[in-house]
Image (tube, grey):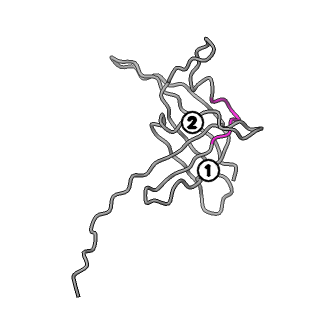
């Protein structure tokens, strides 16, 4: 019987997909996935709802001659869907669907000023 080699190390590449959606039509309005610099979700066992926080850069967009950023787009009561792919080939699995509670702009004073947008919200349960 030939020796079967057992893998000692297996690598995964997890990914996250975060979408902003219209609350009435459920259409995707913005894909935030590529700009998410940090994300955290919390949910207690036996509790209906959880909470989430995500951080985005202060990216500027132009549409019809008007400039806007994530701070202008992501307003309270915007629907956010968070899906995570563990990287093992199972694909994206829904983690949370919720509404934005608060959007805040943060400035970091340094030789190169840095602005980030912090978004927090709650899961719909």
Q: Is residue 110 magenta?
A: no
In the image, what residue occupies the spot 76% across and 39% down?
Answer: 25
Numbered marks: total: 2
For the point 71% across and 36% down, which residue is it?
A: 22
Q: Quadrant of the N terminus?
A: bottom left
The image quadrant that residue 105 belongs to is top right
The answer to whether 19 is drawn above or below residue 111 in the figure is below
Residue 78 within the magenta-colored segment of the rendering: yes
Q: Residues within 10 Å of mark 1 (few under 14, many from 20)?
A: many
**Disc 2 packing (10 Å; few <14; some 14–19; many ≥20):** some
The residue lying at 47 percent from left, 28 percent from top is: 57
Q: Main secondary structure of the magenta part?
A: loop
Q: Position of residue 3 (x, y in %)?
A: 22, 81
Mark 2 to mark 1 CA distance (whole Å) = 15 Å
Q: Position of residue 31 (x, y in %)?
A: 57, 36
Q: Which mark is residue 31?
A: 2
Q: The residue tagged with tag 2: helix, strand or loop?
A: strand
Mark nearer the N terminus (2 vs 1): 2
Q: Where is residue 42 shown, x and y percent of the image?
A: 56, 51
Instruction: Point out the frontmost of discs 2 and 1.
Output: 2
Question: Label 1, on which residue?
Answer: 96
- Residue extending farthest to the bottom is 1
Give the extent of the magenta segment.
74-80
Say what secondary structure mark 1 lies in.
strand
């Amino acid at each position: 019987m030939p020796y079967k080699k057992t893998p000692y190390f297996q690598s995964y590449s997890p990914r996250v997909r975060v979408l902003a959606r219209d609350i009435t039509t459920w259409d995707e309005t913005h894909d935030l996935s590529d700009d998410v610099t940090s994300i955290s979700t919390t949910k207690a066992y036996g509790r209906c709802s959880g909470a989430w926080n995500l951080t985005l850069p202060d990216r500027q967009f132009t549409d019809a001659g008007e400039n806007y950023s994530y701070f202008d787009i992501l307003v309270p009561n915007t629907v956010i869907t968070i899906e995570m792919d563990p990287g093992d080939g199972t694909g994206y699995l829904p983690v949370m669907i919720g509404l934005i509670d608060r959007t805040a702009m943060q400035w970091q004073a340094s030789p190169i000023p840095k602005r980030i947008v912090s978004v927090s919200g709650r899961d719909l349960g």
